[in-house]
Amino acid sequence: MKTDVLKKIKAAEDEYRSMISTAMAEKKRSVADAELEADNLIMKANSNTEDYKKKRLADARQQTEKTHAEIAREGDRRTAELKEKGSKKLDEAVELLVLRFKEQLHVHA
């Protein structure tokens, strides 16, 4: 009877050791799976971050180019406007210069 009890205890201990070993292996597998999933999530997040950064930079570059073009157009328009005003007054300026020159000649003569 003692040997039967001892055998049952021994069998129970072996069964529990096997269960513990299986649980430990499952724990290791679960941790490895979780780490792999975490690494994949981090890689995906990094990829998404990089894509977002590239998109934002492209948007900013596009907006900058648009603003640059608007400023250049405004500068060209203003330049043309000033040239037009200047050429309208060029004849008056030449006449005034010639008149002043003649006055200076008459004063000194």
Image (tube, rainbow, N blue to C red):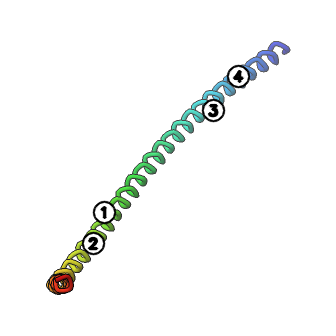
Instruction: Name the foreground residue: 49 vs 39.
Output: 49
Report the front residue among 26 and 89. Answer: 89
Amino acid at pointer 4: Arg
Mark 4 vs mark 2: give the one in front: 2
Q: Residue furthest front?
A: 109
Say whether residue 108 is left or right of residue 39. left
Pointer 4 or 2: first along the chain? 4
- Tell me if label 4 and label 2 are in contact, CB under 8 Å: no
SS type, badge 2: helix
- Could you tell whether 49 is left or right of 6 in the image? left
| Helix, strand or loop for disc 4 | helix
Residue 56, image x, y percentages: 40, 58
Residue 40 image offset from top left, x and y in percent: 48, 41
Q: CA distance from mark 4 to mark 3?
A: 15 Å
Q: Please tell me how crowded label 2 is: few (under 14), some (14-19), or many (20+) other residues with Cα within 10 Å.
A: few
- Looking at the picture, does residue 13 appear above or below residue 38? above
Sequence-first tag of 2 and 3: 3
Q: Counting residues from the N terminus, which is met first, the one under dot 1 or under dot 3?
A: 3
- Label 1's element? helix
Q: Residue at x 23, y 72 (%)?
A: 76
For disc 2, the marked residue is: 75
- How far apart are labels 1 and 2 at the CA level? 15 Å
**Callout in the foreground (1, 4):** 1
Q: Which residue is mark 1?
A: 65
State how far apart marks 1 and 3 are (Cα): 56 Å
* Identity of the residue drawn at 35% across and 63% down: 64
Foreground disc of the pair 2, 3: 2
Q: CA distance from mark 2 to mark 3?
A: 70 Å
The residue beneath circle 4 is 17
Q: Amino acid at mark 3?
A: Lys
Q: Is residue 28 above or below residue 103?
A: above
